[in-house]
Image (cartoon, rainbow, N blue to C red):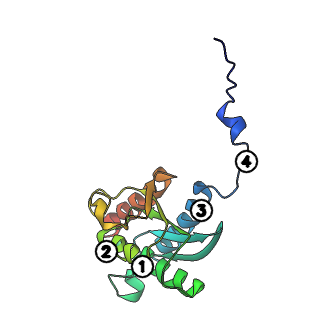
Amino acid sequence: MWSPTIKLPLSKLSPMISPYSDEYFMKQAILEAQKAYDKNEVPVGAVVVANQQVIARSHNSTELLNDVTAHAEIQAITAASEFLGAKYLKGCTLYVTLEPCVMCAGALYWSQIDKIVFGARDEKRGASRYESLYHPKTIVTNGPLAEECGQLGKAFFKERRRVN
Ligand SMILES: [Zn+2]
């Protein structure tokens, strides 16, 4: 028995091209990392997005604040909660240029954020190897502009070795 099946190419099924891609928001996070770089801070940047809109931007400020907990993610959580007037980041996505550390993964757990997208991996300090650190409802992905995200960190530490 012959039954026709119509198969559309995937591109025809999803013709919508959104300017608000993961790459777009990761670029915003990279701009934040660049600000940190320019201030001689370890260059990590983050943005929090809700309804396709950036509601918080931050970068690592451990030098400026003399505070080892002043990672980009921690400040992004605080700023986003302030913006929303809520302690839980429901419906939000965090874009961060570097894989969150264990401390930040813990803070993100408490925020109950929907999704985390990080750029470059942090082989030494990254929290991804401990999957249970993230909230079970939080989706964690990585990859967009990983190369670009990683370059900034590499350039920073290379420069620092040269100066010291
Ligand atoms: Zn951290």
Instruction: Write down the residue under mark 3.
Output: 25
Q: Pick the residue in front: 55 or 139.
A: 139
| Label 1: element kind | helix
In this figure, which residue is indicated by the disc labeled 2? 103
- Assign the C terminus to one quadrant of the image: bottom left
Within 10 Å of the Cα at label 4, are there few (<14), some (14-19), or many (20+) other Cα atoms?
few
Say which label, 1 or 3, has the lower sequence index: 3
Confirm or reject: label 4 Cβ below 8 Å from ligand 1: no
Disc 2 to disc 3, C-alpha distance:
23 Å
Question: Would you call the spot at circle 3 few (<14 residues within 10 Å), some (14-19), or many (20 or more)?
Answer: many
Query: Tag 3 or tag 2, which sits nearer the N-term?
Result: 3
Mark 2 CB lies closer than 8 A to ligand 1:
yes
Q: Is residue 78 left or right of residue 132?
A: right
Q: Are marks 1 and 2 in contact (CB under 8 Å)?
A: yes
x and y, in percent, of residue 139 in the image:
45, 60
Q: Amino acid at mark 2?
A: Met
Residue at 29%, 56% (x, y): give it. Answer: 123
Q: Is mark 1 within 8 Å of ligand 1?
A: yes
Image: 23 above or below 43: above
**Which type of secondary structure does the marked residue at label 2 adopt?**
helix
Whether label 3 lies within 8 Å of ligand 1 gets the answer: no
Which residue is the site of mark 1? 74
Q: Are marks 4 and 3 in contact (CB under 8 Å)?
A: no
User: Of discs 4 and 2, which sits in the foreground?
Assistant: 4
| Left or right of 83 on screen, residue 115 | left
Q: Name the kind of residue labelled 1 in the image.
A: Ile
Q: Which residue matches tag 4?
A: 16
Q: Amino acid at mark 3?
A: Phe
Q: Are marks 1 and 3 in contact (CB under 8 Å)?
A: no
